[in-house]
Image: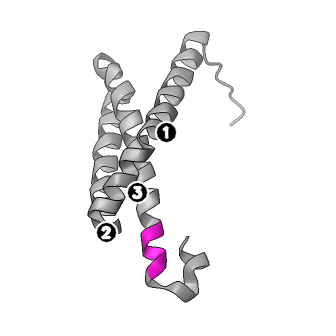
Amino acid sequence: NGTEIDACKEQLDAAGTLYTLSMAAALITTLAQGFCFDRLGPRTSAVGASLLTAVSLALFALGLSTSSLNWLVYIAMPLADCAGSLTSMALFGFAWHAPSHQGLIS
């Protein structure tokens, strides 16, 4: 609609910090995600990580909608990012169920 909203420096800094925390958490937990995938298999990993992602995103929404719970965003977003990474990793396990169509799945 042509309306521009300028974010203040504090908001940009907070968003940058949140992004950095989320990416760091996802990278640090990559080895643990691999162990989980190897130990539990793709199906259990995908289901568990999907549920954890859903709960994390619900907490993220709660943190954004309630000003007294804004701190929750700094826990929920990195957790959702880690769980989302495991979900993505687990999807590659399904590619081996249809070897002739691996490019379509992954």
Which disc, if any, is residue 43? 2
Q: Amino acid at mark 3?
A: Thr
Residue 51 x %, y %:
28, 53
Quarter occupied by residue 55: top left
Helix or strand or loop: what does disc 2 sit on? helix
Horizontal arrangement in the rendering, residue 57 relative to residue 27 (left or right)? left
- Name the image quarter holding the C terminus: bottom right
Residue at 46%, 58% in the rendered image? 88
Which disc, if any, is residue 87? 3
Which disc, if any, is residue 44? none
Q: Do the CB atoms of the residues marked 3 and 1 lie less than 8 Å apart?
A: no
Q: Alpha-carbon distance for marks 3 and 2?
A: 10 Å
Q: Amino acid at mark 1?
A: Leu
Residue at 53%, 27% in the rendered image? 20
Of circles 1 and 2, the one toward us is: 1
* Sequence-earlier tag: 3 or 2: 2
Q: Is residue 92 above or below residue 22?
A: below
Q: Alpha-carbon distance for marks 3 and 1?
A: 14 Å
Main secondary structure along the magenta-highlighted residues = helix
* Sequence-earlier tag: 1 or 2: 1
Helix or strand or loop: what does disc 3 sit on? helix
- Number of marks drawn: 3
Q: Alpha-carbon distance for marks 1 and 2?
A: 22 Å
Residue 76 x %, y %:
34, 34
What residue span does the magenta drawing correspond to? Answer: 92-96
Residue at 44%, 66% in the rendered image? 91
Horizontal arrangement in the rendering, residue 87 relative to residue 58 (left or right)? right
**Residue located beneath label 1 in the image:** 27
